Amino acid sequence: MVVLNRIYTRTGDDGTTSLGSGDRRKKYDLRVEAYGTLDELNAVLGLVRLHTAGSELDRPLERIQNDVFDVEADLSLAAKGPGGARLTVTDTQVNWLEGEIDRLNAGLAPLKSFILPGGSAASAWLHLARTVCRRAERIMVALKDQPGEEVSAPSLKYVNRLSDYLFVAGRYANDGGKQDVLWVPGQNR
């Protein structure tokens, strides 16, 4: 259980932060950057949910916000899982996300053009969340490629699938794709 009774500690005043393992890293460290970007994603998902309240997207997004925190815990190397094991998402969570993508995508017309973010407020926020998610994924891959660093396979898969979910959810939020704004190549030449 997490207990936060003191918000500032002054321990980060030297430009470092503590991982869940207790190790200290520079605040620009790729590991800190990865889970910090996922924290940013989670904040954007909170904004998305202001526009999906009461819709069938809201409960899955609530679950996703919790799962994103699990990925953050994994990246911070926090030992908070069963028996003190490192907490991470699982393949079961990845499979659930794939099922949600398939469920939402089933009713959408195939795309014949790229789409521009917009159409509805919910869709625009979902596309912003997608881009933040993709940035987090790029940072996670860069971290994984560093000597002596690791990123769990389920966490990387989850973040990869999540960006796909956010794309499909953005289309779904646009009245099942009817309000999608299509890219017209060279339109303004």
Image (cartoon, grey):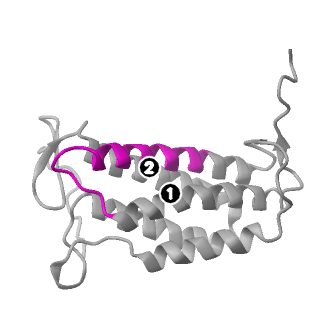
Q: Nearer the viewer, residue 47 or 30?
A: 30
Secondary element under disc 2, as helix, strand or loop, is helix
Q: Is residue 101 above or below residue 83?
A: above
| Residue at point 54%, 60% (across, down) | 162
Quadrant where the N terminus lies? bottom left
Toward which corner of the image does residue 97 lie, by quadrant? bottom right
Which residue bears the numbered disc 1?
160
Whether pointer 1 and pointer 2 mark residues with C-beta atoms closer than 8 Å, the reply is yes
Secondary element under disc 1, as helix, strand or loop, is helix
Q: Horizontal placement of 124 versus 32: left or right?
A: right
State the mark number for residue 137.
2
Q: Amino acid at mark 2?
A: Glu
Q: Residue furthest bottom?
A: 83
Q: Horizontal placement of 65 versus 117: left or right?
A: left
Magenta part of the chain? 128-152
- Mark 1 vs mark 2: which is more N-terminal? 2
* Residue 161 x, y percent position in the rendering: 54, 62
State the mark number for residue 11.
none
* Residue 137 x, y percent position in the rendering: 44, 49
Q: Amino acid at mark 1?
A: Asn
Assess whether residue 39 is covered by the magenta stretch: no
